[in-house]
Image (cartoon, rainbow, N blue to C red):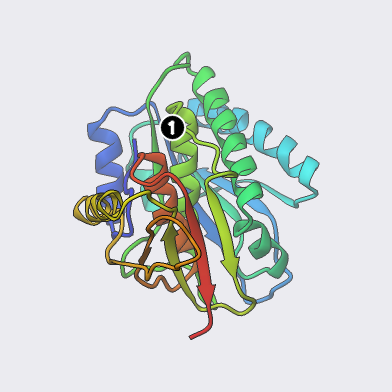
Amino acid sequence: MLTRSTDVYVTLSERARIANEANADLFVSFHENSASSPSATGYEDYISATAQNVTASVREAFHRVVAEFLTQKGIQNRGMKSASFQVLRETTMPAILVEHLFISNPNDLILQTDVNFINEAAQMYARAIRAALATIGKTNGTVCLDAGHGGEDAGATNGNEYEKNHVLRLVLQIKSILSGTQIDLSNKIGYKVVEGANAFRIQSGRYETKADMLVAMNEALRQQYLYYAQELNSNSNEKGWRFISGKYNTQVDAFNAAERALRDGKLKYVTLIGTIE
């Protein structure tokens, strides 16, 4: 289960309430770190400063899986820590807060926007969650995944890259893995992004008829997979019909929207278009 699946703001108390009322077995809140020095790098996780022993054991199992991945990738492990974060205090089940790399570090930022790394990290976190649940005898237990920030709360930023978007994309990928609905995006998303792009759009694949294209476009709009779209002018040298979405400010925003539409079967293939405007 998720505390948010779109770009909306959910208060800290509401995030804890969602997990508590669902009687979740584990709560994991995902964030990205930031520092005034761009050299700060790596991963760390937190439990409540007043956490019970069971939470400490759960976090240790979770962290062991993460640590192995960090070593393989050459990423700094900043360790297991404790703090009095509100979502950790107010949840009634074992709860972990993850600081997934530094958005302020250039090398970390490259990883946070790399499709292959994001998928590998999501796979790793899914394994870590399963290991954590196993320590409390809840192999098939319920985990509440929390994508930090959202809506007007962007979290940490670096240029046009926003923490709220990065963690939502990661959480959605983890959820799809845990629920068995993950799709291979490698042959479903193409890229035409120029260097320095600051405007991003989703272009659909080709449809055999204009009617088919309009049905798909209108359905994606009606169910809010896209917030705006228009028909592309037909190229006389190409067969088929396509449409293109409205503008997204970041590639991550566009990717999140495209991934959701592909995962739910509303689109079959897309190209991410990035231009300078």
Instruction: Please tell me whether residue 256 is drawn above or below residue 19 in the rendered image.
Output: below
The answer to whether one can see residue 164 in this image is no
Instruction: Please tell me whether residue 157 is drawn above or below residue 28 in the rendered image.
Output: below
- In the image, 220 versus 158, the foreground residue is 220
Q: Position of residue 96 (x, y in %)?
A: 49, 40
Residue at 59% x, 35% y is 123
Residue at 63% x, 36% y is 63
Please state which amino acid type lies under the numbered disc 1.
Pro
Residue most extreme to the left: 222
Residue most extreme to the bottom: 277
Please identify the quarter of the rendering in which residue 195 is found.
bottom right
Q: Position of residue 25 (x, y in %)?
A: 38, 26
206 displayed left or right of 160: left
The answer to whether one can see residue 36 in this image is yes
Residue at 39% x, 67% y is 234
Q: Which residue is mark 1?
A: 94
